[in-house]
Amino acid sequence: MSIRLPFLKRAPTFEHGIHPAYHKETGSLPIQRLPFAPRLIVPLSQHIGKPALCCVLVGQEVLRGQVIATADGFVSLPVHSPATGVVEAIGLMPSANGKMVDSVTIRVYQADGQAVQVREPLDVDALDKKDLLAAIQRTGISGLGGATFPAHVKLSVPPETVIDTLVVNGAECEPFLTCDHRIMVERTQDLLRGIRYAMKASGAPRAVIGVEDNKPDAIAAIQAVLPADGSITVQALETKYPQGAEETIIYALLGREVPAGQRPAAVGVLMNNVMTLAYLGRLLPAGEGMIERVLTVAGPAVERPGNYIVPIGTPLRFLLEQVGAHSNASEIILGGPMMGMTISSLDVPVTKGTSGVLAFGKGQLPAAATGSYACIKCGECLKVCPKFLNPSQMGLLAAKREYEAMAERYNLDRCFECGCCSYVCPAHIPLVQQFRIAKAVNREKAAS
């Protein structure tokens, strides 16, 4: 029998959720830089919003850091050349989601030192809010946790909205992923600088950084550089999935519930990922564009797992060759195993939203390999859903393609596709995949 000692305070968390095998071994490994691939494929749409407009020509030489595509309006971002080289092609290329997207292919000058050659240093403290947001847009930074929402748009708070707290998401609850962890340890000053810029842009008077308690070195690194005025604090959170989801981390840190169908601003909160803010703090004062990112490469089929600085546009085939991916790697996931997506081609490139690349051999994803069975109504999925939904009933409706009933009677739209239900289902029913299909069908019907 276990006894809870009264003087041991439990770290804040949310209700429900799961404790999967975390596989965070790469969290102790320093960030390394990968070499440049001979060719980089740079998509013009790496963010939510309108794709960028190409402004270079085939055969044109480009410098590392040079703008190769300009933002097409407010909800859009420029694209910068990740390397010095020559534009080899402009046209449709495959992307991770299976769609063909306009891309610029750059043949890299392998003998070049590849220093950033295009930059416009800024005195960020001298900028007013309008100029600050415009400068953030020029960096091309989007949400680097995977959402890819343009950073300047997210920080553009309407005048009638009051933000009292900036929540900084350092939970990194997905198994295998540790790039946020290493950023918090190795680029702590960049992170704090980016947080201050975000507070200025959004008007938030305070910020709180939420970090799961399986990262004590990250918490210690942040605590060592916190301002004395208490405007920025760090809070350890219980290690539990999906602790890093927007609504769950806000509840864990502040005890506030975001109303259904509304954004965190409705409860005075703005949220950003630690990677996004660390790059903001790094690139904005230097006047540089987003041309590379830190990501985790891991999985049982990877010989040299770790956290790597990878140029945007690097083909996954080249990336996996550099880390010694085994020849039996048959399943490649972009992002984490819970919410990431499998890909069918290794010719797709790393983009701004690529937080991880995971490689698995045949049979190393057992739930996907064994097939599914009929629902036995055990209720396990109800016990873990962080939104208190009924995944079992929605799954039964999905099997009958009654997608509208899922939304009208069972709040399908509140599901943020964390995958907890699929993880615990003893029948291996792909519930979260069914919910994604249902949402897509309902969106198409609503748009028609």
Image (spheres, rainbow, N blue to C red):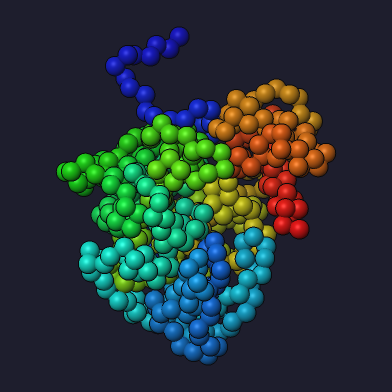
The answer to whether residue 140 is above or below residue 174 is: below
- Visible residue check, residue 194: no
Looking at the image, residue 265 sits to the left or right of residue 368; the answer is left
Residue 93: x, y in percent?
A: 63, 73
Pick whichever, 239 or 210, lies toward us. Answer: 210
Residue 384: x, y in percent?
A: 58, 29
Pick whichever, 400 or 30, lies toward us. Answer: 400
User: Which picture quadrant has residue 326?
Assistant: bottom right
Quadrant containing the C terminus is bottom right
Residue at left offset 62%, top offset 61%:
96
Residue 116: x, y in percent?
A: 34, 76
Residue at left offset 50%, top offset 46%:
263
The answer to whether residue 386 is above or below residue 443 is: above
Quadrant containing the N terminus is top left
Residue at left offset 69%, top offset 34%:
410
Looking at the image, residue 443 sits to the left or right of residue 220; the answer is right
Residue at left offset 33%, top offset 58%:
201
Which residue in the rendered view is the most extreme toward the front?
A: 160
User: Which picture quadrant has residue 154?
Assistant: bottom left
Pick whichever, 305 or 429, lies toward us. Answer: 429
Which residue in the rendered view is the most extreme toward the top?
A: 1
Residue 88: x, y in percent?
A: 55, 84
- Visible residue check, residue 162: yes
